[in-house]
Image: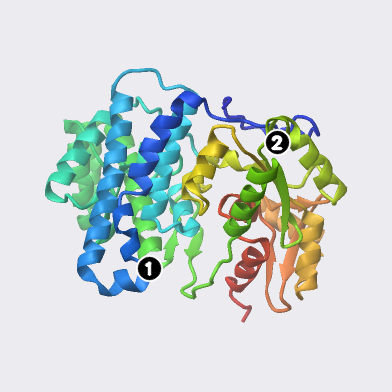
Amino acid sequence: MGKKKHKKLKYDLVETLSQQAFPSEYEDLTRSLYSKACQGSRHLWEKIPNMDVLKYDKELREQFYSSANQGMTSAQDDIVDIVLSGDEIDFSKELIIRGIADAIAWQLLGNQLAYARRFFKAIPQPDLYNSNFKSVVLAVKESLKSKPNTVSLISDLTSFIQIGDLLEYDPKKGLTIVEVKEGAMNAKIGDFMRFYMQSQCDQTLHYFAQQEGEQAIKQLQRMSRQVNRMSYVRSVINTGNGVDPDTNEQMKIPEAFFPIETWDKQLTHTLNQSHDKGWAIDVIDNCLFLGVYTSEHMRIGGHIIFNHWFDQEGGTPECPRSRLIDCMRTPLALPIFSRDIPDEYKFDVLFGRKHVCMGICIEKLLEECKSIGYSVRFATNKEQGLWDKTGKRPYKYKGKSVFIGDGVKEALLMDGIFLRIMFHGQTPMSVIKTMIENIEAPK
């Protein structure tokens, strides 16, 4: 795959959605890492026909978690060996490594995007060769000595975990965020910070600044911000509530459970059809367009046929379009390893034997909302101005932000909805319904 482009490209019938694939020489490595990271407990799957079995069979549950966690740890050990070998890691290989690490992270987070967002600060991840990497690897090994059934995931290996150095999961205690500090000064600052947080004595802070100097204070401030972010993420995961220390935004995850419908079965069906006849198309909820191209000539030009079909059905240059393989380079997208489709198809997509194109027709999405009883309206100039001041950027259709409501509550159409639909496999109407039901009714 080519280097990641941050700038949004202008729509082009011939170029947009053209096929990309990973080099074939990485397939054996990818299969090995995937097997360990996502299938460590496979030998137990026949014993688990449903989740109630795990719930009530303590011995089987412990075997399941132990096997799965050891598999994830083994996959990470292989990745660490690759990084520490000193061999060059090109962009494609890095994407594969991060995709596997992401698949581990999503398992630890229960595939919950609401939690994953709290870890992502929209900044570049550190280089895999960063100076702190060896210290973090050592911390993982020390942690596993006393907690052998715990997964201790190195945050810098992922594409989106940007809070803490390690994300640890203990089957009995849940998630823990760990910060690894190396060097005498960091240890001294950490000790002082813990003392100051307990005492809140400004005089000792003044004395510390005089004694240690400006650089120590700057490091203290950085560590303090990191502690506040870690506290915020813990609070959201454990209680569903928290205040983001960077934005002061109140975060609340509803206690109510909203079942989300997925279209992974339709994707599998379309992949099957394509496998048999060389190509296949489908439309989910009358607005999500799907094209799968398998035969050689269709893989080369299928995206052009897809773009033409999508445009004929109402797609515009502003409508979201993606390739399924783009999930490997999109932070907060589920990597293809985490999608509920047959394993062979995952590798077919990654290594160029199948090409999957997706597009969301906004006009048809809004029509579908209206057909099931939701209201749809454009934001007023005043509303648009207020939203622009918040720094948030809602999706704009025909130059205007769009509100969707149920007569009591309204929600603004945001880009995150398209992430859920295309890269988390959630059906469009299920996402819209959940979005509106999550909003508190006005008092």
Residue 344 picture location, percent across and down: 50, 43
Q: Is residue 388 left or right of residue 104?
A: right
Residue type at mark 1 is Pro
Q: Is residue 280 left or right of residue 163?
A: right
Under tag 2, what secondary structure?
loop
Residue 305 picture location, percent across and down: 80, 38
In what quadrant of the picture does the C terminus appear?
Answer: bottom right
Tell me, for residue 321, which label it has, or none: none
Q: Label 1 crowding class (10 Å Cα cut-off): few <14, some 14-19, many 20+?
A: few
Q: Is residue 81 left or right of residue 159?
A: left
Q: Label 2 crowding class (10 Å Cα cut-off): few <14, some 14-19, many 20+?
A: many
Q: Is residue 5 visible from the viewing direction of this image?
A: yes
Residue at the location (45% across, 43% down)? 160
Residue 64 picture location, percent across and down: 27, 59
Residue at the location (34% across, 62% down)? 46
Query: Relative to 99, is 239 above or below?
Result: below
Q: Is residue 68 left or right of residue 110?
A: left
Under tag 1, what secondary structure?
loop
Give the labeled residue for mark 1: 49
Residue at the location (62% across, 63% down)? 431
For marks 1 and 2, give the one nearer the viewer: 1
Cα distance in 3D space between marks 1 and 2: 39 Å
Q: Nearer the viewer, residue 283 or 395?
A: 283
Q: Earlier in the sequence, mark 1 or mark 2?
A: 2
Q: Is residue 200 visible from the viewing direction of this image?
A: no
Residue furthest to the bottom in view is: 443
In what quadrant of the picture does the N terminus appear?
Answer: top right
Residue at the location (69% across, 33% down)? 299
Residue type at mark 2 is Leu
Give the labeled residue for mark 2: 17
